[in-house]
Image (cartoon, rainbow, N blue to C red):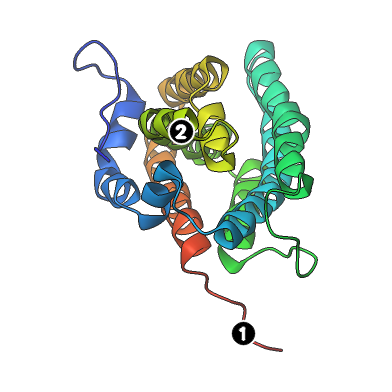
């Protein structure tokens, strides 16, 4: 997988380009993850995929809460409407896709009630805390990687997924990957980026520095979330 450069029609002074450039090393590491490679080519073990979908479902529940809080703190009605709509989508539409996969009989049955992994709990706790306690521009920057990085990774994986679907139209991995290359998801990622640029333009210099840190932390969690699906880090025994 190749590291991505934002499509902007040339170099611009968009603040989000600075965020993207600042996290280049992390994004290259994401592109090189074994989990994503095997997800794209359909070779990921079924039990690993089930664990990932379970964790992603738990993550989306927390992410929806963070988006709802962010919406309540947005500086204008249009921004509030976008974050609130995204919260509803995460809570209802995307969660429904997860439930269909988990209960559709394609994946191995659950051995126990899903619980947050350390990485999943850390990520959602960070996002909810940022949304509730940080200035709006910083909270928006923390929210952005889930939109933007997922959209870029999804676009890259979609080409491989198309080949897998051609050979096996019912393959769950290919169907899953295809949803994140959908035009609606790509448009939402672009809108989230635009809102973060707008927030940065109204932010103080100290807030912009905090935005870089927040985006970096969330990008680290994106890397860890995917990596620990294939290489789990269990909780210490009580």
Residue 236, disc:
1
Q: Is residue 210 above or below residue 237?
A: above
Q: Quadrant of residue 77?
A: top right
Residue in view at x 32 percent, y 20 percent: 14
Give x and y (percent) for residue 202. 46, 21
* SS under mark 1: loop
> Which quadrant of the rendered structure holds the N terminus?
top left
Q: Is residue 63 above or below residue 50?
A: above
> Which quadrant of the rendered structure holds the C terminus?
bottom right
Residue in view at x 43 percent, y 39 percent: 211
Label tally:
2
Q: Earlier in the sequence, mark 2 or mark 1?
A: 2
Q: Is residue 213 left or right of residue 62?
A: left
Q: Is residue 128 above or below residue 117?
A: above
Residue at mark 2 to residue at mark 1: CA–CA distance: 42 Å
Give x and y (percent) for residue 184. 57, 16
Residue closest to the eye, 224 or 208: 224
Residue closest to the eye, 189 or 208: 189
**Residue beneath disc 2:** 167
Residue closest to the eye, 138 or 37: 37
Q: Is residue 28 above or below residue 144?
A: below
Q: Residues within 10 Å of mark 2 (few under 14, many from 20)?
A: few
* SS under mark 2: helix
Residue in view at x 48 percent, y 63 percent: 230
Judged from this view, the residue extending furthest toward the left is: 11
């Amino acid at each position: 997988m190749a590291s991505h450069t934002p499509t902007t029609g040339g170099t611009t002074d968009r603040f989000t380009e600075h965020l993207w450039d600042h996290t280049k090393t992390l994004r290259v590491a994401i592109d090189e993850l074994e989990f994503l490679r095997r997800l794209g080519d359909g070779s990921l073990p079924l039990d690993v995929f089930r664990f990932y979908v379970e964790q992603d479902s738990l993550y989306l529940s927390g992410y929806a809460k963070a988006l709802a809080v962010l919406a309540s703190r947005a500086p204008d009605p249009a921004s509030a409407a976008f974050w609130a709509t995204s919260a509803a989508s995460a809570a209802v539409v995307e969660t429904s896709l997860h439930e269909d996969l988990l209960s559709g009989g394609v994946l191995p049955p659950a051995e126990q009630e899903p619980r947050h992994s350390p990485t999943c709990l850390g990520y959602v706790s960070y996002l909810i805390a940022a949304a509730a306690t940080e200035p709006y521009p910083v909270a928006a920057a923390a929210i952005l990687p889930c939109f933007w990085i997922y959209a870029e990774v999804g676009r890259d994986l979609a080409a491989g997924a198309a080949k897998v679907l051609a050979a096996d139209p019912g393959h769950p991995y290919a169907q899953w990957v295809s949803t994140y290359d959908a035009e609606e998801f790509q448009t939402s990622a672009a809108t989230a980026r635009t809102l973060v640029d707008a927030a940065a333009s109204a932010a103080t210099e100290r807030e912009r520095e905090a935005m870089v840190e927040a985006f970096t932390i969330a990008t680290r969690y994106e890397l860890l979330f995917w990596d620990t699906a294939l290489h789990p880090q269990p909780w210490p025994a009580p």
